[in-house]
Structure formats: structure tokens, C-alpha cells
Amino acid sequence: MEVDQTRLEHEIDTLAAFSDTETPSVTRVVFSEQDAKARAWLETRLLDAGLTVRSDAVGNTFACWQGSKPDLPAVATGSHVDAIPFAGKYDGVVGVLGGLEAIRVLQRTGFKPERSIELIVFTSEEPTRFGLGCLGSRLMSGVLAPDAARKLLDDNGETLDTIRGRAGYSGSLESVRLPQGEYSAFLELHIEQGPILERERVPLGIVTDIAAPASFRILIEGEGGHAGSRLMPGRRDALCAAAEIILAVERSALATGTVDTVATVGICQVHPGAVNSIPSSVLLTVDLRDTDAERRERVQEGIFATSREVAGRRGVSISLESVNADPPAQSSPEVLTALIGACEAEGIGFRKMVSRAYHDSSFMARIAPVAMLFIPCRGGISHRPDEYSSPEDISRGVRVLARTLASLAGHAGKS
Ligand SMILES: [Zn+2]
């Protein structure tokens, strides 16, 4: 497994130059002019590797290396190339250009896949333009309904349909969805975006679980009044109720007994917010994350029940509104086994870990067995111009990815 490190580095640098901000920062928002140029450049790279390239109605791009049994579900790998404002050059890109290099590595060894191997470049993993992350994989997996996608607007008030049409992607959004079983496996190579691998000096992370957030709002309405003339008995102070609820949120996350449940009240808006006025209403926004959907649901229900109890006792009214709930994902045992086997065959150390950020794999997990492979990034830094992964770490990731794709696709020459 010989990775062409020089070429891969050069390609990563070339792709980074398609940016609306100056080097070393990368700004490449989906369907912008720079995004279109980057896609066109990338397509020539994919074609040069002898892959068949097609795109769907939302601009997800598929580059296929046809196997000897093309009717079998393909093995897929991939990630994204859009970048938030003032980002670095590795997030997503390592999974796309590294995925391409993994395919070229296998081609150079003379490997002939039995199942087709496909590289997927997902549209708009970053929420920059439409306020919703993983647009392409959400539609592909059916987590986002086409009707909901059609309501998405960018900051200029333009619809997704208008914008994608202008970028050359037509056809119905309904056609983006892929059936369960379309892929026999999906693997995503990605930078860790956290400090663990570097700190522990482990070259690779094998992701077993991808955590996902749910968020909800709690609106508490009590009774305001003059902070001096309204005596304490009989007050219905919305902020005092909120204080009890905030502590209950913390307690309920701690009570699960696992570090994988995290709950945060990040917003507390107090009305009227004057020093001499009893708070009449408070809006709390809660972010609750977990690797286990059922546990997260139980914690959320517990927080809702406590909130109602506090409200009843304090004579305030309460309304609870769910804002968002993304699915956590578990890696497939078969794909994990293949990844671990590849690490062992390459003699590269690894540790199992949880992805605390969500990725396209979170959604692909709804329609295919998935797993992710993390490589270290300096200081755990991501979404910044100084994001960095070394060529050696990227190469190790590509080698293991290549070997895993080969084992999952099967060798056509084998009798
Ligand atoms: Zn990413």
C-alpha cells in the first residue's frame, strides 16, 4: 500500500486555493463560485483516475470504480469539500482526496474489485448557507424530507431549488434519496477535530459511535412586578423557576452515569431584564447530546417532567418545544472488524473512540453499515486556518482506508 504522499499534498493545497478568503484560510460555501470551480477541478481528478462520475439533484457527486460484479451493492467512501468561513484545508477534504488516493493506491497494486467502489462527495456538510448541516446526506438517507428541503432559504432569501438550479443541478429532490441496501458499507476518513489522538500519540481512531444533538426550548412565564413593592410571599418569579430547571438539566445528564450524555443550557433570555423588576418570562435553550438515541430521549423526557413539576409548584406556566433532534449513529460491527483488520495488517496502532461531532456518516448510517476512521490533527484544532494534519498521518489513514475498501469490496481475481 504505497501512498503518493507528494501528489496528495499537492492536491490538498490546490483544492484549498479555491477559496473566498486568503491562504491559509479556506472559505468555500456550497454553490458559491469557488465551490463550482473546486467541483470542476475535482471532477477532472476523478475522471483521470478512470472513475465514472455522476451527480444527483442536490449536487452530491458519485465517482465509481466499477467492480467485476457491478450488480452487487457497492462499497462507498467519501466526505465533503465545502468549508465554513475562515476554515482550514483538511476538514472533509482528507476524506475526499484521501478516498480518491485510496482508490488509486489499489489501482496501482493491480487490485480488481468485485463490488464497485464509490467515492461520494456530499453537498453542504456545513450549515453555512442553509442553516442545516449535512444537507446532501440527510436527503440521501431520507432523514430530511424533500418538502422540508424546498423550504430552506439562504441569507439572501433564495430557495435551495433556485440556487441548485443555477449551479446546474436540476431534477427532483425526491430522486436524491437512496434505498436501504444501496451500499454494502460506507466508510469516512476524517480529521479527529479533537485532541485525543495527538495527546495519546495514537495514529488512528476507529469511531464506534457518533453522538448527535437534540435541542429544545423551555419558555417559562410567571408574573412580573416591582422588585421592592412586591413582597416575597406569592411571587411567581420566572427566573427562579428557570434556575431550578437549569440545575435539573445538569443533574439529569450526570445521572445517566456515562460521559456520553452531555446537556447544556446555552441560552437564558430574561424578560424584562431590569434590576428592579421581577422576571416575568424566561426562555431557555437546551442542547442535549448522546451516542444513544433512547437514552437521550429518556433524559429529555425527564427534563420535561421536572420542568412541569417546578412550574406547578411555583405557579408559573411552561411551554416545551423541540427544535431539532438528529440521530446518533453506531458503527457496524462488520465494518469495524474490517477496519481493525486493516490496521493490524498495516501495523498501525489505533484506539476506539466516539465522534462528538456529527458527520455525513451519521446520516449514511440510516441506509448502510458505516464506520469512520479518524486521523490526528494538531492541537485538536479544526474550523480554523491553522487546522493541520501531517502528511504522514494522512498517509496512514489512506493506507488503512485502501485496505479496508479492498477487503469489503472483495478481489475479483480471487478464485
Ligand atoms: Zn467535516
Image: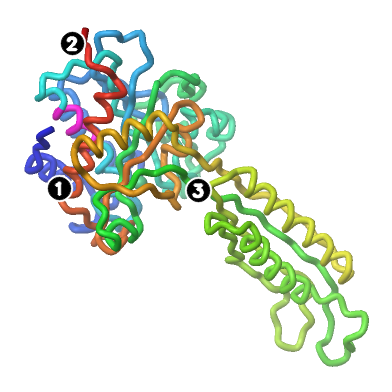
Contact? badges 2 and 1 (CB < 8 Å): no
Q: Does the magenta stretch include residue 285?
A: no
Residue that label 2 marks: 413
| Residue 237 percent location from the top left of the image | 81, 76
Assign a secondary structure to mark 1.
helix
- Judge left or right: residue 412 versus residue 128: left
Front disc: 2 or 3: 2
Tag 3: amino acid: Ala
Let me know if residue 166 appears in the view: no
* Circle nearer the N terminus (2, 3): 3
Where residue 2 sits in the image (x, y, percent)? 10, 34
Q: Quarter of the image containing the C terminus?
A: top left
Q: Which of 128 and 46 is in front in this view?
A: 46
User: Please, what secondary structure does the residue beneath circle 3 have?
Assistant: loop
Residue located beneath label 3 in the image: 211
Residue 325 can be seen in this image? yes
Residue 13 is marked as 1
**Mark 2 residue type:** Gly
Residue at mark 2 to residue at mark 1: CA–CA distance: 36 Å
Are the residues tagged 1 and 3 within 8 Å (C-beta)?
no
Name the residue located 49 percent from the left edge and 45 percent from the top edge.
Answer: 132
Please state the extent of the stretch shown in magenta in the rendering.
97-105
| Quadrant of residue 252 within the rendered picture | bottom right
Q: Which of 24 and 64 is in front in this view?
A: 64
Q: Is residue 140 above or below residue 201?
A: above
